[in-house]
Amino acid sequence: MDQAEATKLVVDALTKKAKTKSKFYFSDLAKILGEKPRAAKKYVTKMVEEEVLEFWSSGSTSMYGLKGTGKQASAEDED
């Protein structure tokens, strides 16, 4: 699988689930990709760098979501 295929898989899956959920655990993304954690991490990291996904952390929990989606997306842009 190349990066473009991985990105398409993740974006399609997260878009379908966007109505009910905006943030996903890394394990959810690895399952979508069908990869082991180490391989999936490379794809996910690249998607964050390309700003397809955004990384979110509460301090104790780390999650990922599509860039610009979710309840906090509008509040985070306010200054």
Image (spheres, rainbow, N blue to C red):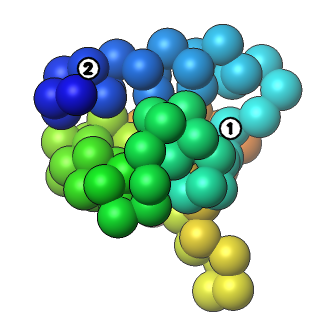
Between the residue at mark 1 and the residue at mark 2, the CA separation in whole angstroms equals 21 Å
Q: Residues within 10 Å of mark 2 (few under 14, many from 20)?
A: few
Q: In the structure shown, which secondary structural element does the residue marked by tag 2 occupy? A: helix
Q: In the structure shown, which secondary structural element does the residue marked by tag 1 occupy? A: loop
Q: Amino acid at mark 2?
A: Glu
Image height of 2 relative to 9, above or below: below
- Please indicate, yes or no, whether residue 78 appears anywhere in the rendered image: no
Q: Give residue 21's position: percent from left, percent from top.
A: 77, 34
Q: Which residue is mark 2?
A: 5
Q: Residue furthest bottom?
A: 59
Residue 41 figure quarter: bottom left
Q: Nearer the viewer, mark 1 or mark 2?
A: 2
Query: Which residue is found at the position 16% from the left and 29% from the top?
Result: 2
N-term-proximal mark, 1 vs 2: 2
Of 8 and 70, the residue lying toward us:
8
User: In which quadrant will I find the N terminus?
Assistant: top left
- Please indicate, yes or no, whether residue 28 appears anywhere in the rendered image: yes
Q: Give residue 53's position: percent from left, percent from top.
A: 39, 42
User: In which quadrant will I find the C terminus?
Assistant: bottom left
Q: Give residue 17's position: percent from left, percent from top.
A: 71, 22
- Direction from residue 2 to residue 73 in the image, left or right: right
Q: Which residue is mark 1?
A: 22
Of 53 and 42, the residue lying toward us:
42
